[in-house]
């Protein structure tokens, strides 16, 4: 079963995010209290715990959810293989995948702290179609259309 492992926020872009137990997500905005919120296509970032585990094994680092600046850390779903347009029910929210990976123009704080950044390769971004709360442990349901 796919589920939420961590919800993470920060008030600045490009920095490690801090975990919170419950996130409040607003339609067409993203997660309240996070610097990436706004009316654009990358409202929420997601990264799989499996990607973080791989980076830990590969580099021998002790990494925690939020260290790659992801808003939602997941488990049990290969995020970067979901096509753009995929809809997911996470907690009370409905989210749509808008982008797979991203281009990094310069090395950010995360790269310097971890030695690598898996977000450009395996992170995904979503837009909030329906707002609501998301809690640690909530199921992630891929909606087949």
Image (cartoon, rainbow, N blue to C red):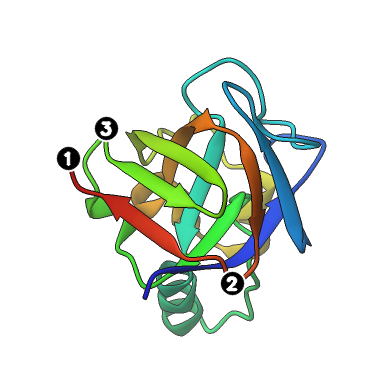
Residue occupying the point 70% across, 54% down: 8
Q: Which residue is mark 1?
A: 145
Furthest-left residue in this view: 145
What secondary structure is marked by label 2?
A: loop
- Vertical arrangement, residue 128 with respect to residue 8, above or below: above
The residues bearing labels 1 and 2 have C-alpha atoms spaced at a distance of 25 Å
Secondary-structure class at tag 1: loop
* Secondary structure at numbered mark 3: loop
Q: Which residue is mark 3?
A: 85
* Badge number at residue 137: 2
Out of 15 and 65, give the one closest to the viewer: 65
Image quadrant in which you'd find residue 100: top left
- Residue at 22% across, 53% down: 81
For the point 75% across and 37% down, the residue is: 34
Q: Is residue 104 visible?
A: no
Image position of 37 with respect to 19: above or below: above
Q: Position of residue 133 (x, y in %)?
A: 67, 48
Find the distance from the CA under tag 1 to the CA under tag 3.
10 Å
């Amino acid at each position: 079963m796919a589920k939420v492992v961590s919800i993470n926020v920060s008030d600045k872009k490009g920095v490690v995010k801090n975990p919170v137990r419950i996130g409040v997500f607003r339609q067409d905005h993203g997660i309240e209290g996070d610097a990436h919120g706004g009316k654009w296509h990358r409202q929420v970032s997601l990264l799989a715990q499996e990607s973080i585990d791989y980076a830990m094994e590969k580099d021998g680092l002790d990494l925690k959810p939020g260290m790659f600046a992801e808003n939602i850390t997941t488990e049990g779903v290969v995020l970067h293989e979901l096509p753009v347009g995929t809809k997911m029910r996470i907690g009370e929210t409905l989210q749509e995948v808008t982008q797979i990976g991203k281009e990094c123009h310069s090395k950010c704080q995360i790269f310097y702290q971890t030695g690598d950044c898996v977000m450009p390769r395996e992170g995904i971004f979503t837009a909030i179609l329906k707002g609501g709360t998301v809690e640690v442990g909530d199921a992630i349901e891929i909606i087949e259309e």
